[in-house]
Image (cartoon, grey):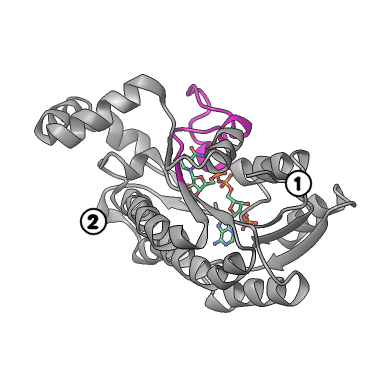
């Protein structure tokens, strides 16, 4: 898949991984970008820096169904079709489940999961109209390995893996490919609490995830060989992975404290 002249819809393209994806999409020739994000000023600023690009700016929360419908309707009116959908926006609130604020539990499901299903639903007719295209879903390594204190966030991200598999098979006859990416710790606002930790750069994650879609990969897993080994161990012998987690239970609990990006 070449990006020359392509029309792309991305959620959360104004910061972190999503912002780097916007830069990469433009560098590789995409000419039409629809972006959904809540911060009006930041979104306006971003589009001002690229005067040659045809932007559709959708201000709002992806958890609001009317915002998603508005995005699809405006793309249909202005462009008539869509080549690529990138479900990137995500939020996080960690901690022991019994201490999690109810609203933050609901919000994580609404933003990280329900919004992805709905926006994909609304985008399918537009993607079909393009005759061939792709969907890139941004999950997380925490969606592949059940991790204490990230039960809600991790479950929404595990849901994205399953959803991506379902939709890849459902949309294959229409020439629409679906790729799911699983970043590990990446140096963005979402991880600002962990300043001293070694992390991937958002540009690296953005480029590798996009290349995964362009090369029609199914899953783009970050974290290298060690992560691959953990995933395999957890799949084949979950009880052995339980022992590894139990060995640093308190550290994990402490480091999840006040880990929020909402
Ligand atoms: N950073 C990591 O370590 C890491 C690891 C694994 C997976 N991920 C996943 O990668 C994706 C991007 O994360 P990031 O680290 O780049 O996050 P980030 O730096 O916090 O940026 C999030 C982006 O999403 C937008 N956004 C957030 N909530 C939204 C909402 N309710 N409605 C509309 N837009 C919303 C934000 O814009 P506004 O605030 O203006 O709305 C912003 O552009 C997320 O799905 C995240 O779960 C991140």
Q: Position of residue 189 (x, y in %)?
A: 58, 41
State the residue in front, 51 or 8. Answer: 8
- Name the magenta segment's main secondary structure: loop
Q: Which residues are magenta?
A: 180-205
The answer to whether residue 229 is seen in the rendering is yes
Mark 2 — residue? Answer: 98
Residue at 59 percent across and 77 percent down: it is 69
Is residue 173 left or right of 28 when viewed as pictured? left
Q: Give the crowd class for mark 1: few <14, some 14-19, many >=20 residues within 10 Å.
A: few
Within the magenta stretch, is there residue 4? no
In the rendered view, would you say 75 is above or below 142?
below
Examine the structure image and report whether residue 184 is included in the region drawn in magenta: yes
Q: Residue at x 77, y 73 (%)?
A: 78
Q: Nearer the viewer, mark 2 or mark 1?
A: 1
Choose the circle earlier in sequence order: 2 or 1: 1
Residue 4 numbered tag: 1
Q: Position of residue 106 (x, y in %)?
A: 38, 66
Q: Is mark 2 within 8 Å of ligand 1?
A: no
């Amino acid at each position: 898949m070449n990006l020359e002249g392509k029309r792309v819809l991305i959620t959360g393209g104004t910061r972190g991984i999503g912002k780097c994806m916007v830069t990469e999409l433009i560098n590789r020739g995409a000419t039409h970008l629809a972006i959904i994000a809540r911060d009006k000023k930041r979104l306006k600023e971003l589009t001002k820096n690229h005067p040659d690009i045809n932007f559709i700016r959708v201000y709002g929360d992806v958890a609001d169904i009317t915002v998603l419908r508005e995005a699809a309707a405006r793309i249909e009116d202005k462009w008539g079709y869509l080549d690529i959908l990138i479900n990137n926006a995500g939020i996080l609130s960690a901690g022991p489940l019994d201490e999690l604020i109810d609203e933050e539990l609901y919000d994580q499901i609404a933003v990280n999961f329900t919004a992805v299903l709905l926006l994909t639903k609304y985008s399918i007719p537009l993607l079909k109209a393009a005759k061939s295209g792709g969907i890139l879903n941004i999950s997380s390594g925490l969606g592949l390995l059940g991790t204490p204190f990230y039960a809600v966030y991790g479950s929404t991200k595990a849901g994205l893996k399953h959803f991506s598999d379902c939709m890849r098979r459902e949309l294959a006859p229409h020439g629409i490919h679906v790729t799911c990416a699983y970043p590990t710790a990446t140096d963005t606002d979402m991880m600002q609490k962990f300043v001293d930790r070694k992390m991937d750069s958002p540009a690296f994650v953005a480029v590798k995830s996009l290349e995964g879609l362009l090369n029609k990969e199914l899953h783009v897993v970050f974290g290298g060989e060690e992560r691959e080994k953990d995933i395999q161990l957890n799949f084949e012998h979950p009880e052995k992975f339980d022992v590894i987690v139990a060995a640093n239970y308190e550290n994990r609990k402490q480091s999840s404290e006040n880990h929020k990006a909402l």
